[in-house]
Each structure stands twice: as structure tokens, then as C-alpha cells.
Image: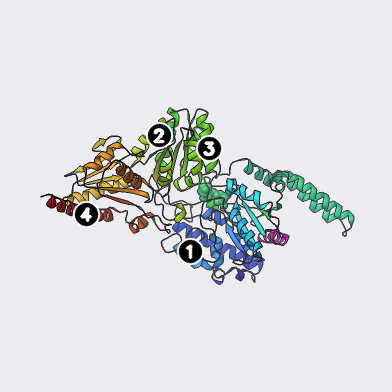
Amino acid sequence: MGSLLSSISEPRDLRGLSDEQLDTLAAEIRDLLVTTCARTGGHLGPNLGVVELTMAIHRVFDSPRDRVVFDTGHQAYVHKILTGRAAGFDGLRAEGGLSGYPSQAESVHDIVENSHASTALSYADGIAKAYRIRGEDRHTVAVIGDGALTGGMAWEALNNIAIAKDSRLVIVVNDNGRSYTPTIGGLATALTTLRTNPRYEQILDLVKKRLNSVKGVGPAAYDALHAMKRGLKDALAPQGLFEDLGLKYVGPIDGHDRAAMEQALTQAKRFGGPVIVHAITRKGFGYDAAEQHEADQFHSPQPFDIETGEEKARGAIWTDHFADYMVELGARRRDVVAITAAMMHPVGLHKFEAAYPDRTFDVGIAEQHGATSAAGLAIGGLHPVVALYATFLNRAFDQVLMDVALHRCGVTFVLDRSGVTGDDGASHNGMWDMSILQVVPGLRLAAPRDATRMRELLDEAVEVADAPTVVRFPKGPPPEDVSAVGRAGGADVLARSGAKDVLIVAVGSMCSVAVDVADRLVAQGIGVTVVDPRWVKPVDPAIVELAREHRLVVSVEDNGRVGGCGAVLLQTLNDAGVTTPFRLHGIPQEFLGHAKRNVILERIGLTPQAIALGIVEDITAVAGHVLVDVDRQA
Ligand SMILES: Cc1ncc(C[n+]2csc(CCOP(=O)(O)OP(=O)(O)O)c2C)c(N)n1
């Protein structure tokens, strides 16, 4: 660790440093960011872009007395470093180590840790109002990217902040022009216009020249300056956007010019009401490989080689299979269109976009709009495929329920990163989708067990024209194909051996786990049937009948235990009068701390070994119970 860096244990340590020392510190921070992310992976690009901006905030404001809220929170590494956590970067995102997002458990300087975008302005609005009502003279700073500004919540917040005239609230817009890829939409265009407006540059030059030529500060100088200011304001009219809302605006400021940032923030702090400080930054700034990385400027690279910037090779993941198949599907079905919420590459729609640009829509970080717009596309005669990370579907629940399902729209939602995702922490696990979607009438939900089934189920999903369909799959590589040994209704039977002791109903990625469990049970003389429902909602009547025939039913899913597939299956069996003992395996309904996926699965008992052990105990108890009954009858 650099020598200056090791002298910073809290933000106030920044105050006594000279400009030169601050520049050195910025370099040391970048070095730590690059070397850490090269080893662990992480949000490198966004953090390289906010080094000076974060330093300026911590020099002008007094955290934790003043509160700093980072939208999404993926860009808070520099904040962590400046609040005494540089040494912890060794264990970034690993179990027991630093979280990749702000974390209240880690530091009093951290507030918002949800990592779902576009919430910071609402938090900040509330915090600032609370301090005003409590009579506390404290400032709240919200840092929000141009990407996060595309989310509806941000605009709901701005609408309210604009009338909270005495809120001591400073909104720093970190405008790097990008989400992962360039930010899309009218707002992005307005910001770009502002940033690249040649008139703005000309006027700045003019201002400088005129002011230099004015001797003394008389009325003439004032008029000239005033006229220039009006000129500037006109030139900046595109972002009248903010000013029309009644929000004070400072900028645009070069976000890598720390001194300029400090000046703007000081001005904003003095104002005493809500102010927007518009900072222009470059994602990946200061590390060539990141700045030049075309797809996403190293938004969130895997571990990589520092010299070449080359990411460590990885095998094909579920997303890659989806990406390829969407192109085929698009060729066969001209009515299929695709929607991403600012995650073209991460969800694998970039290939579809390359092949069918007119049929691909990046809606920004706007899952709600994306879902209802998809309903509109369906009403208009197309079949939209909305590809999201499972955790972000939570945002669009009401839209799926009321706008898509109630209106019987044929929309297919593809949920990537479902189940335990691990190193991004609690907010990124896709463990809610199969619970919240269970309550949506008419919706059908498929969980493919391997890449072949993913293609098959996607085909079946896009055939459904009068209801929402969902295809969900996890993070990482799919398993080798798991072939079926038979069929029961619409479900695949994956293993059938010996007596009808145990029926394992395995969901999606848990199918290969269940086959492993079956091998272990068979080795102990326990009869097992493993079934993959393929479509987990609605429950297949064939599975109800299978359950009736076995002595123990075990469900296994990588979704929360509450309200998920197992819970609904149990309820369905109950309704059908099937009284076979039932054991439900799933994710405990907790916010799971960050760690590698396999470490978490181990911790929560979703491994073949743990499940098999539980079944041996359960079937022994059940068999004992049956024997007692038999004795009694005799
Ligand atoms: C609701 C929601 N949808 C999607 C994401 C995934 N996501 C994480 S960061 C990001 C882009 C953020 O862009 P911006 O706010 O401009 O920040 P930058 O990374 O450019 O600094 C996206 C889409 C998310 N965090 N939350």
C-alpha cells in the first residue's frame, strides 16, 4: 500500500494534505483499485472514475456527520478507502472480507447498501428532511450516475426534492455517459448535448477573454459578466431539465479536476437548499485497459492481467447459451423482440442486438417501464423477451402482475443470475422471483436444468401468447446435460431406482444436485425417483400423483423457502388430499452475506451431501412410523 494511503484512516486526514500530496494519493488509490480488482474482480471502471470526485466530497463535507449516499453503491470503493478500509481490500468480496458495496456493518460512513439502482435521491431526500425537522445542521450528499438517473425512482425523488427548498441536499451527478454501455434515452442525449455543446466551449472562451480585457470591476464588467452568464445559461438550456424543475444547478465540472470539484461542492454546500452538481467523469480513468475496454470500460471485470488487461478465460456460462439461442429464435420468429434494462451484455442480448437492432430495446435502468412497455409490444402484436437479472425483477412486480398478467399479454421474462449469486452480497441473490411470481394468476414459470432444456423451454415460452412466461436460470456455467429416463406429464423423470421410497422434486439448477443425491441414496438401498417439473408453475398434476405413490416427498430449489416452489407444491398436495410426508429444501429467508456461491450453498445446506443426509434421516423416521402403524393394524 502506498505510504500516503496508509496514513488515511478517516476523511479528516485528507484535509491537511497539499495539492501535490493529494495527487499522489489519487495515484495510490488507483493503484490499489487496479491491483485489487485484477486479483478479485470487481467494479473497477466506475471506481477509477470517481477518485477525485470522492476525495473532493470527503474534503468539503464532514462524514459521518454529513451523510454521503452512493446510488447503487458499486462505486463506493474509493469512499471505503478514504474511510479507513484500505487494508481490507485484500479480502474484497470474499467471505468475511469487505463487501463490494457500502455496508452499515463495516462503517459508520456507509448508509445505503441495497445495490439496486436509482434509490439514493429518495434516501437522501428523507435523510435531509429528517435533519431539518430534528433541527440538526447536517448536509446530505447523494452521488448518482447518469445511468442510475434513467430509473423512474430518481425522477420521483427529484420531483419531491425540487419543492423541499430548505433541504441541505447536494446531488452529485457523476456523468460518465455510460451505464455498462453508453446510457440510452432522452436524458442521456440531453446530458451529452450539454457536455459536447461547442457553443459552451466558445462561450467559456469568450467569458475568459472579455473578463481579461475588463479593467477594474465597474458596472461594465458586471454587465459583461452578467451577459455571459445569461449566454451560458442559454447554452446550457438542454439541462434546463433540472432548472425547470426548480433545482439549482452547478456545472458541468470536470470531475477529475479535484480543486474545481471542491469549489463547486463548497458553493453548493453554502447555498442551503437542494443543488445539483454536474460532474463529467470518465469511466476507467487512469488505467488504459479500462478506458479502452469497448464493451463496458471494465464496469465489473473478472480477475485480469494488469499488463494486458486481459480477463482470465472462463468457460461458457448460461448467459452465453441464451445469447446464442436468442439469435436463432429471432431468425425463426420475426415477431420476437428483446428488452434489456441497461444490461445488454450482462444478460446476453448483445448478439440479438447485433443481428436485429430494430427489434432490440435498451430501456435504461427501468425494469418497471420495460415490463409495461413489453405489455404494449405484446398488445401491438409482437412477442417481447425481457431479459433481467432475477433480483431486479423485484422492481417490476406490480407491472408483471397488473400490466402484463391481468391483460393476458404474451411476454417472456428471462431471469439470469437466479438463485444464490454470492459475491455481490444480499441484494444480488436471485432468491425472491419464484416466490413473488407464484402469486401471479396465469403466469407460467420454467426452470431449465441444463442448456438444452433452456432452449427447449424458451421455445415453449414464446409459444404462449396469452399469459406471461418466465424462464429462470442461475449464474455461472450450466452443468453437463442431464438426460431424462422418462416422462411424467410435462415433467422429466431423471432417475428411477428401487422402491418408491423418496420422490425428489428438483427445480432448475438443483436437478443435477438431486441426481447426485439419488446416487448416494441408492447406494444405501433407498429407492428414489427424481423428477424435474420443467414448468414449475403451474404444478403438474403428474407430480401430485407421483407424490401420492411415494413415502417421502423432498423438494429442492435455489429460491427462498417461503412461498417458493416447494411451498406451493406442499399446498397443492394438501389441497389434493395427498398426505405423504414432505421435506422442503431451499434458501433460508435471510439476507445472505457475500461469499462465493459454493461457499454459501455449503453454508445453507444446498449440497448433495447435506440433502442426502437429511433424506436418510427423514426416510428412516418415516419408515419407522409406517412400521409402527403396520404393527398397530396387526
Ligand atoms: C434496479 C437495477 N437494475 C440494474 C442494475 C445493474 N447495474 C448496476 S450498475 C449499472 C449501471 C450504472 O450506471 P451509472 O449509474 O451511470 O454508474 P457508473 O457505473 O457509470 O458509474 C447497472 C445497470 C442495478 N444495480 N439496479
Q: Is mark 2 within 8 Å of ligand 1?
A: no
Q: Is mark 3 within 8 Å of ligand 1?
A: no
* Camera-nearest label, 2 or 3: 3
Mark 3 surroundings within 10 Å by alpha-carbon count, few (fewer than 14), some (14 through 19), many (20 or more): many
Q: Amino acid at mark 1?
A: Phe
| Residue 134 in picture, x, y percent from top left | 64, 65
To which residue does mark 1 refer?
A: 89
Q: Amino acid at mark 2?
A: Ala
**Which comes before the other along the chain, label 2 or label 3?**
3
To which residue does mark 3 refer?
A: 372
Circle 2 — which element?
helix
Q: CA distance from mark 2 to mark 3?
A: 18 Å
Q: CA distance from mark 3 to mark 1?
A: 41 Å
Q: Amino acid at mark 4?
A: Val
Q: CA distance from mark 4 to mark 3?
A: 47 Å
Which range is magenta? Answer: 253-273
Residue most toward the right?
219
**Which comes before the other along the chain, label 1 or label 4?**
1
Q: Who's the residue at 31% across and 37% down the image?
A: 540
* Camera-nearest label, 2 or 4: 4
Circle 4 — which element?
helix
Q: CA distance from mark 1 to mark 4?
A: 43 Å
| Residue 200 in picture, x, y percent from top left | 74, 47
Q: Is residue 269 magenta?
A: yes
Who is closer to the viewer here, 216 or 396?
A: 396
**Which comes before the other along the chain, label 1 or label 2?**
1
**Which comes before the other along the chain, label 2 or label 4?**
2
| Residue 314 in picture, x, y percent from top left | 39, 48
To which residue does mark 2 refer?
A: 461
Mark 1 surroundings within 10 Å by alpha-carbon count, few (fewer than 14), some (14 through 19), many (20 or more): many
